[in-house]
Image (cartoon, rainbow, N blue to C red):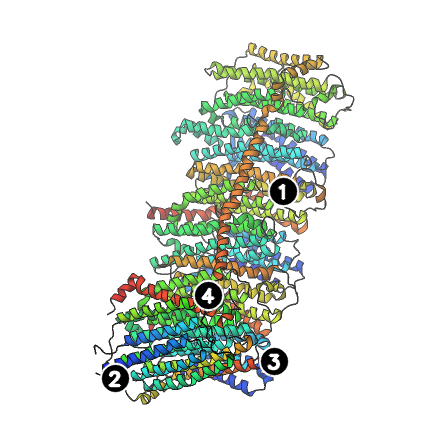
Amino acid sequence: MNFDFSLLTTELALFVLGLSTFVLGLVVPSASRRGLGSFAALGLLLVLGIAVINWSNQGVLLNGMYLVDGYANFFKVMFILSAILVILGSFRYIDQHVGHHFEYYSTVVFATLGMVVMASAGDFITLYLGMELMTISFIILVAFRFMDTKSLEAGMKYLLLAAMSSAVTLYGLSLVYGATGTIIIGEVAEAVARGGNSPLLVIGLTMLVAGLGFKVAAVPFHMWSPDVYEGAPTPVTSFLAVGSKAASFAILLRLFLGGLGDLHGQWAMLVAVLAALSMLVGNLVAIPQTNIKRMLAYSSIAQAGYILVGLVAATEAGVKGVMFYAFLYIFATVGAFTVVAAVYNKIKSDEIADYAGLVQRAPLAATVMLICLLSMAGIPPLAGFVGKFYLFQTVVQGYMWLVYLGLIMSMVSVYYYLRVVLVMFRDDPKDPSPIEFGSAANMTLIIAMVITLVLGIYPGPLAEVANTAAQTFFLR
Amino acid sequence: MVQFALNHAWLVPLLPALAFVIIVFLTRPWPRVSSTVSIAAIFSSFVLASSIAYGVFTNPGFIEKPLEYSLRWFGMEGFTVKVGVLLDPTSTMMLFMVSMVAALIQIYSTGYMEGDPQYSVFFSYLSLFAASMLGLVISSNLLQMFVMWELVGLCSFLLIGFYTFKISAREAAKKAFMTTRIGDFGMLLGLLFLQIIFGTLDLTELAQRVPAFEQFGISLGLLTLIAILVFIGPIGKSGQFPLHVWLPDAMEGPTPVSALIHAATMVVAGVYLVGRTLFLFAEVPGAMEVVAFIGAFTALFAATIALTQREIKRILAYSTVSQLGYMMLALGVGSLSAGMFHLWTHAFFKALMFLGAGSVLHALHNKADVWDMGGLIKKMPITGWTFVIGGLAIAGIPPFAGFWSKDEILAVTLQYATHGHSLGYVLFFMATFTAFLTAFYMWRMIFLTFFGKEKPENHPHESPRSMTFPLIVLAGFATLGGLIGTPWANYWSKWIHFGQPHHGEPSIGLMLLSVFLGVAGIGLAYIFYYKDEEKLRVKQLAERYQTLYKISFNKYYVDELYLWFTRTVVDAGAKVLYWFDIHVVDGIIDGMAGFTKVSGRGLRYLQTGKLQTYALVFFLAVLVITVVLAFGNPTSAGILGGGK
Amino acid sequence: MNVPVLTLTLLAPIIAALIIVFIPKEEDKLCKWVAALGTGVALALSLYVYFGYDQSVGGLQWVDFGGPVPWIRDLGVTYYMAVDGLSLPMLLLTNLIGFAAVFASWNVTLRVKELMIYLLVLIAGVMGTFIAQDLFIFLLFYEVVVIPIYIMVIIWGSSKRVTKEYAGMKLTIYLLIGSAFLLVGVIATFVQSVAITGTPDMSFEGLARVDFPEQFQIYMFGLMLLGFGSLLSMWPFHSWSPDGYAGAPTAVSMIHAGVLKKIGGYGLIRVAIFVLPLGAKFWAPYIAVLGVIGVAYAAMGALAQKDLKYVVGYSSVSHMGYVLLGVASLGVVGVNGAVANMFAHGVMSALFFSMIGFIYERTHTRWIPDMGGLSHQAPRLSVGFMMAAMASLGLPGLISFIPEFTIFVESFRVFGWLAVLAIAGIIITALYVLRAGANTLFGPAREEYNHVRDLRGPEMVPLVLLGGVLVIGGILPSLLFDMVNSGVAPILVHIQEALQIGGR
Amino acid sequence: MENIYSLIAFVLLSGLVLGSALLVVTLKNLVHSVLWLIVTFIGVAGVFLLLRADFVAAVQVLVYAGAVCIMIAFGVMLVQRTEMAGSNPVNWRFKIAAPLVGGLFIVIGLLTAKAQWVVSGKEVPTQTVENLAPILLQDFVIPFEVAAILLTVALTGALVLVKEVKANGDRS
Amino acid sequence: MATGLNPSYFIALSAALFAIGLYGAISRKNAIAVLIAIELMLTAVNINLVAFNKFLTPEAFIGQIFAIFVITVAAAEVGLGLAIVIAIYRNRKSVNLDDFDWMKW
């Protein structure tokens, strides 16, 4: 059998990194364990390099069970990047509020591995295991702040609800398997094209939508996310918001466009309605929030709504839009959450009201927050605008109402983003002492800011990369 | 020199403009320098204007073919506007008159405004005014004229409100601007019509095109409308009824200003404009009748108000309104010569009287009520006697200037009547009666002011030479200025006429009537206000006809009407609209924003924090979606049915 | 023309802002001078471009980098910076006002560094919209400006009838919602153009070459009208404007009323009408009606105001009604007038707001009944104020008369008596402007304002610069009109051609 | 005939599974629930046997019925130190949940009834384990490895949480 | 084969088991009971998988392998779940899920 291990270099490297972080953590004295963060970050950087170098090394393993195409590689790079940013941004937070360095860092790496596997998954089993690896890692991470009951409560909620959604997803997968007689996505597509066993597919479809909708936090399957986002340690929240969501979108596209593409007529309107609901509910409920993490959680529900728009179109342009948007969304979200984490280190509060005068205490952080929030709102010349342009142009023909709704709601979202801006910029701080972030967090912030700006002003290169990647998605 | 002046006529307005700039930017801190600059500029203009006048009046060719040169101001496809100079006898006369009066009044002002902290500013305004007025006069284009028209309005506004410490001055300035603005609105519409229909605002081109208006596809009715619209501008500017209300209030400004702007020059701009566009009015008899009637009515109307006024400048102001009515009447009956002639003579005697009044006020420290004066001629002989000359001129006593011009107007009106316009008789009657009233109220003022008993509380003194010199010069013109237009040697109508110059035969009868009316008026005033030292008869009369007296004294309550209109209609309307804007237009927006917020707050409480509720919602959604997908959607039902 | 002058112009304020980032907070004066330098360079460059533009050739000139530089290939977006007779006056206007705005903020002491940064970003953003010849790049700049404005309002603004927070939020959200509709229109137009031609091209010229179906054009034009119209404060989408200006600090009011609103008018001409001529033809009468309502309604609204900024706020709504009227005439003369009027109104309202700003700084009130006689204490200030007031009421000899007149000429021809209502607006305008001006400046001097000092030093810059433009533009309108005409005429030629092909 | 037997076996096993499962979710005593859970799992293992999946059945019995249930039982003991009788109360949601799950069942049943099966006639090879092993380690090597990591992570996580909380509990 | 078993029977069985599990997951207050109910749901999935394996792909063992993985993961989840339940019980002295609503709205 031909099994080209070189295609798995990224996965293997991550695996090795995760294990070595874990083992090192067990071996070194606890005083030097805080260095593990840097170790993990550097290691991830190395993996990132490997992934980028291996970009063009694409192929299919095990008769389509494992797909290493441009699409997967794009997402892999994205996950690794976000992991790097999250780890860089979380050094101090972890030191102060979590402890357990090696478990934390290795679990983050393993979660990343889970996402990477998801991106490449070509069959249901790989997909399921990748997803579960990620989910279980996140359950642990969410509950990691054991002293804080909120963190545990969030862990509990996430565990139980994620398990239920896993069950639903699995049930859906099993029915699709039953309807088509295969679990390899490419073959599923052929079977569906032949007609398949439609009644089962309908239920399977619904359950997959529900299960994956839960993972991406689309309304009405979103209800876990505000609570979990609020309770989880902030760096975890940010990783949950970007990594988990992006990975889920990766398999969502894989399943629905790759596998069930021929049923587009059935699920397109459904997804459109979910997208619309997500934009509406996410943005509307974000308005009265007073806790910044909770507000960002609702906002990320709305973001999921925007990204779903790309799925509705079910075209190459739509895939490209999703990829582009997911990519820029990472930087905006990580940037915002890193600020939240860093500010929490100092003022021990996530209330928006306590951000008063942030621009005077930490101008960089306030600016990054501003830029990231506005990018999420889609204000030009920030990346979010270009992303929305890509997404919404795909549904102009056929779903014009979605375009209206999406753009108007994204302007409504400016309202609550600006409330944060208002507090940060207008007020004078109660305590004028400057807030130090540490160089690693600063690096994350600067990267997030610069990339958000650059992608907004000069999105050409990324758009082209996304374009070629999206092409491989349909070529297979 | 003459040739240079003709070719550089644009220098005439430009020099004062330059003076304005110099004063504003350079010499403001040095009052004397400022006034010198200003006077030098206007004097140079005057010299130039004299040369031009010499050149034009000695060359008969200019009457038929005016000297015109222009350059492109701005333009685009289908709409090009040129600015330029149009020198014909009418404008030349105006140039000469305006520059001279302006020069004299500036000289006068050096004395009158002595010591005022805003001395330099005052002169800069005067220069700006002179520039605009001269620019208006030589305009070859109606748009250019409109620009200058508004600029003189601005100067008028600034100068009326010059005494900024007086609230009344501020209010008067606003009123003046607003009222003329209403007139300008009509005029602007007229200009737009002209531009759109005839494609040009150039005076000479219009003069060629308007008579052929039918080729431009418009009816006589529309042309009449256009003419009336254009006429609304002069109604505002020249204080014709019903937009006359600002002119008496404009006397809040310094007296030289009243003399220059609100008597001699600016207010006659309306008359001048009608004169310039007479080719338009001449086409439409209906509009001419309107002009004539409004003129005559204004003349009479203002005269009746002037009978009872007490403030010296206010009396003069109503007299100005009245005299402007005369001019309009003349134009309305079709005689450019008569109108312009009266404009010319009026400029001198009215400026003279205003300056005289200024001299009086100067002496009495701004005590304005004529009933508080008396016997001033003893202490102020130059002022007094020049004023008397002015009074004789306006009353129409030969050989003073006013006699000739007023006589001419009466003559053309009568001629108009006899040529088949029955309205003309009414106009003639109004004009003659006004002539009588004019003589009466003017001399009432003169008797009360300069003759009779001296009031002990007054300590009058003659004004400085800088002020008396202009008085003397103007008195000279008021005396002799009319002689160029006597029926026996009528140079005037040879120079300035519209259509064929008409050689009205000197009508001795009319002259006698005119003189009689003037003398009667003066005589009546003599009886009431000079002979009757206690003025008992007048008081009895006022008692007996109390209603009439009150109506006249309160100016027919026109101001009150306007005030009521502004307060209760415009302002209240604005308030209502503002309420609507805040509560309805904006209310809808705020309501939408509020709804968004409330719905967000409402939806928020679905999030109960209980994880099993979340699960419940989750699976409810699954159930609903499955049901809808499986049974609700026709396409999926088809797929279900055809599940082979 | 190897030097990308326009890009440099755009970068000048941005570079200045970057420099200010590294200046310590305490160095107020230095920040101001750097800002002044940045905007000054931009002003100088735009003047250079303005007078270096060859009107006899017309079209797009000063093209940076020799032509469109591919930017986002799959959207057909190009970095295409060039100017024509339509953009140039707007570019110049932006820099005039930007430069003046720095000096109008000269007395600010609160968080100067930040203020200057936002101000510079704002100026650069506005500038970008006017020089970009690509719809996408235009949009990028279109909303850049919203956020600095919001921040400036909430920090340096003032609360009167409404709080500054409310005003800022209203301003921002209102404009953003409007722009959402615009964005829908733009996206749909772009998608449709790709569907028709097969190749993506976002440049204005490229889009204008596409023959969109008539119904589609009408639909899209409606959306764009909504977007641009709300930015232009078209009735009934104007209510953000008075509140917004009242809440905003001087510099923001100046730039917002002066140039930002003009982006609406510019976009309407450059994007909506140019690309969708058939839609324009359909909507023109409605635009005219809304414009006329706006003129009369806002003028009456201004009449009811006692707060100086509200007066000017409503007046700017009213003036934009004239612009709409001119645009709606779809004739060379009218559109010329509209563009020129935008320029004129920009200069005038900026002067107005800067003077009000100075008054407010000194008296701490904008309430007209509380003021009076200020001309005694501050004659120069009064001169500036009166000049702005006079320009506002369309006094000939100042810049705004001729544009208004040209608008009247064309709209009177096209819309007849409807236009008369708008022309009647000049009476109401005169009424409220005079009330505001005279009641503030004239009348007896008041004791409590004896401490008020006149403008001096750098404070004179707005007055001299903007006032100078008011006068020069009034005396030599051809300086402006020839330029505008060279830009507008080709656009209208294009529209006429499109109407002949597509229309009946 | 075999069909009849399998049908009978299916019905009996189904009854066992569903009945015990219903008891699991309705009984008030949590310990009883756990015991019935074991019964359910064994029933399901029977179903697996019916389906010729003996290895899976074995795993089911060992892992679920054995390890998991014992783990749960320990868990119950750890957290439920008081009276067991009312240890498993029902909340208000059952009123909505009952029709909901009923509806779900009916919908799935209706749709399933419409399904048309093209059943592969072949039989499952009897040598389950021998056949499973190579597939698991060749074709499904990636999921297999991922599962290994997953277990490691889960183990670490569980340890971290319980250990630290204990320390925490001691502190408090 | 007319009277023989077909996958529909097993789907019905699994659907019923799934529904029962779901009912338990939603209606029980005790966190451990909910965990148990979720295990029922996962078991229902396994029935599906094994049944399809038998009827559709008897030779490939896909369904069986899938089922084995599901069991593995489910076991891991239960372990983790119990850990969290214990942790939270130590902290809040309660396993009643309705008590865990500190974060809401």
Do tag 2 and tag 3 residues touch (Cβ < 8 Å)?
A: no
Please identify the quarter of the rendering in which residue E57 is found. bottom left
Tell me the amino acid under the disc marked 1.
Answer: Ile
Instruction: Confirm whether residue B10 shows in the render.
Output: yes
Tell me the amino acid under the disc marked 2.
Answer: Glu
Q: Residue at x 78, y 21 (%)?
A: B456
Q: Chain of mark 3?
A: D
Instruction: State left or right for residue E16 relative to residue A22.
Output: left
Taking depth in this image into account, of D63 and B187 the one nearest to the observer is: D63
Pinpoint residue B174: horizontal percent, then vertical percent: 61, 35
Taking depth in this image into account, of D169 and B148 the one nearest to the observer is: D169
Under circle 3, the secondary element is helix
Q: Chain of mark 2?
A: D
Instruction: State left or right for residue C503 relative to residue C391.
Output: left
Tell me the amino acid under the disc marked 4.
Answer: Ile
Q: Which residue is mark 1?
A: C368
Q: Which residue is mark 3?
A: D171
CA separation in Å, label 2 and label 3: 61 Å
